[in-house]
């Protein structure tokens, strides 16, 4: 169990948490119905996957090296962190959408 928790805690950096927050907020804002949640989570996950590529290109890294770093980000952390990331997106976007529906009409 400790190995799983170590892998999960080491799998997220501060940049990852900011990207999760930004893409979750964006996803919750573009949703119109709760049935769109899986599609919005998929789009947020894809955007979260390719954003580091563009961040690295903006800082002067060559495109081929930035692409390799983007793919290594998915490979080095294992499937557990990717599943946790998808779960976090489902929960966060769902909660933000529900809060928007409850408090957004006032």
Image (spheres, rainbow, N blue to C red):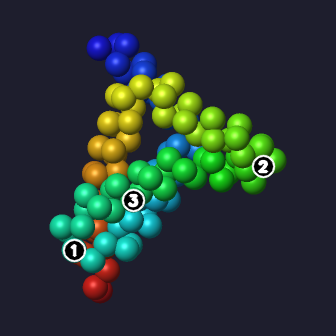
Q: Number of marks in the image?
A: 3
Give SS at disc 2.
Answer: loop
Q: Position of residue 5 (x, y in %)?
A: 37, 21
Q: Position of residue 72 (x, y in %)?
A: 56, 31
In the foreground, 87 or 104: 87
- N-terminal of the pair, mark 3 or mark 2, is 3
The answer, for residue 32, to whether it is visible in the render is: yes
Task: Specify the quadrant that holds the N terminus.
Answer: top left
Q: Mark 2 and mark 1: span between their CA atoms?
A: 38 Å
In the foreground, 62 or 97: 62
In the picture, measured across the screen, residue 88 lies left or right of residue 20, that is left
- N-terminal of the pair, mark 1 or mark 3, is 1
Q: Which mark is residue 43?
A: 3
At horizontal 28% and vertical 51% (from top left) the residue drawn is 91
Instruction: Tell me whether circle 2 and circle 1 mark residues in contact (CB < 8 Å).
Output: no
In the foreground, 24 or 68: 68
Q: Which mark is residue 59?
A: 2
Q: Position of residue 42 (x, y in %)?
A: 34, 55
**57 up-or-down from 72: above or below:** below
């Amino acid at each position: 169990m400790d190995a799983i928790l170590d892998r999960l805690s080491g799998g997220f950096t501060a940049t990852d948490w900011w990207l999760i927050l930004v893409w979750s907020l964006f996803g919750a804002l573009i949703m119109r119905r709760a049935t769109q949640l899986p599609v919005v989570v998929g789009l947020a996950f894809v955007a979260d996957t390719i954003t580091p590529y563009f961040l690295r290109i903006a800082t002067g890294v060559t495109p081929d090296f930035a692409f390799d770093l983007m793919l290594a980000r998915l490979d080095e952390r294992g499937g557990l962190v990717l599943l946790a990331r998808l779960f976090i997106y489902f929960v966060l976007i769902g909660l933000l959408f529900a809060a928007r529906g409850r408090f957004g009409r006032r």
